[in-house]
Amino acid sequence: DIQMTQSPSTLSAFVGDRVTITCRASQSVSTWLAWYQQKPGKAPKVLIYKASSLESGVPSRFSGSGSGTEFTLTISSLQPDDFATYYCQQYNTYSPYSFGQGTKLEIK
Amino acid sequence: EVQLVESGGALVQPGGSLRLSCAASGFIFSDHYMDWVRQAPGKGLEWVGRSKNKFDSYTTEYAASVKGRFTISRDDSENSLYLQMHSLRTEDTAVYFCIMFLYGEPFWGLGALVTVSS
């Protein structure tokens, strides 16, 4: 099975900051990688799929990059609504899907 | 528009059974793999299992934590996915989501809450 290692687990930042979250896969997943934002009591919201495709309706300050085993989610200028928990997910169908441990983004 | 709607969540005693359903629309259901994912209170996301499509003979796969206790099935005529859960444990308490991918884009339902408690 493919293991996903996400870092950092917690991130404190100011409104307006540029932040980056990293996800590493234990073996190549090509670009079968999604990023989600989750707020308490809600289902995960899709931000990025296929590593770098922006989901419809998601602000352009969110971007994803990477392929193979190294991926990043970048928020170019943090807004108050962005403080939430973020997860990566690999979805290579030759393996069970797996998720990163999550990154809690907090207001500094 | 793809829609996934879970139902059947409930409070159940340890050792009990429960069946969740996921009603799907907006895509050709029989063509796609369908998966269940869960999230325990305050915890991360955990893959539960998968039903492959008709081309892959509807093969099912399970996480080690549920194998032998949970069974995934589907009814393509009803565009529905099921999760039959037996021998439930307190650690199975979670919100259960059905998910699918269409041309690489993920779609999730809103989830169904299963609480295992005496």
Image (cartoon, grey):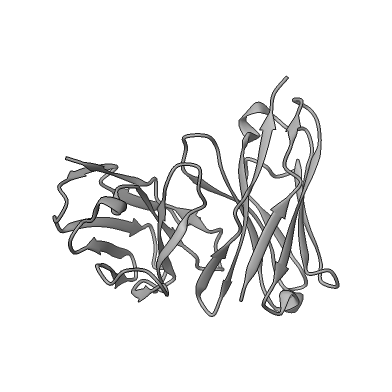
Q: Residue furthest right?
A: B77
Q: Quadrant of the C terminus of chain A?
A: top left
User: In the rendering, at what x and y percent does residue A97 appear?
Assistant: 53, 59
- Identity of the residue drawn at 60% across and 43% down: B95
The mark tally for this picture is: 0
Residue B88, quarter of picture: top right
Q: Is residue B26 above or below residue A3?
A: below
**Residue B1: x, y in percent?**
61, 76
From the viewer's perspective, is B55 left or right of A38? Answer: right
The residue lying toward the viewer, choosing from A51 and B52, is A51
Q: Tell me what residue is drawn at x 35 percent, y 50 percent.
A: A5
Q: Quadrant of residue B3?
A: bottom right
Furthest residue toward front: A80
Q: Is residue A2 above or below residue A56?
A: above
Q: Position of residue A49 (x, y in %)?
A: 42, 71
Q: Which residue corresponds to the image point at 78% horizontal and 69% vertical from the top-left?
A: B79
For the view shown, which residue lies furthest in the top direction?
Answer: B118
In which image quadrant can residue B92 be found?
Answer: top right
Where does residue B5 sit, x and y in percent of width and height?
Answer: 68, 59
Q: Taking B74 as reference, is B31 left or right?
A: left
On screen, B32 above or below A80? Answer: below
Viewer-nearest residue: A83 or B21: A83
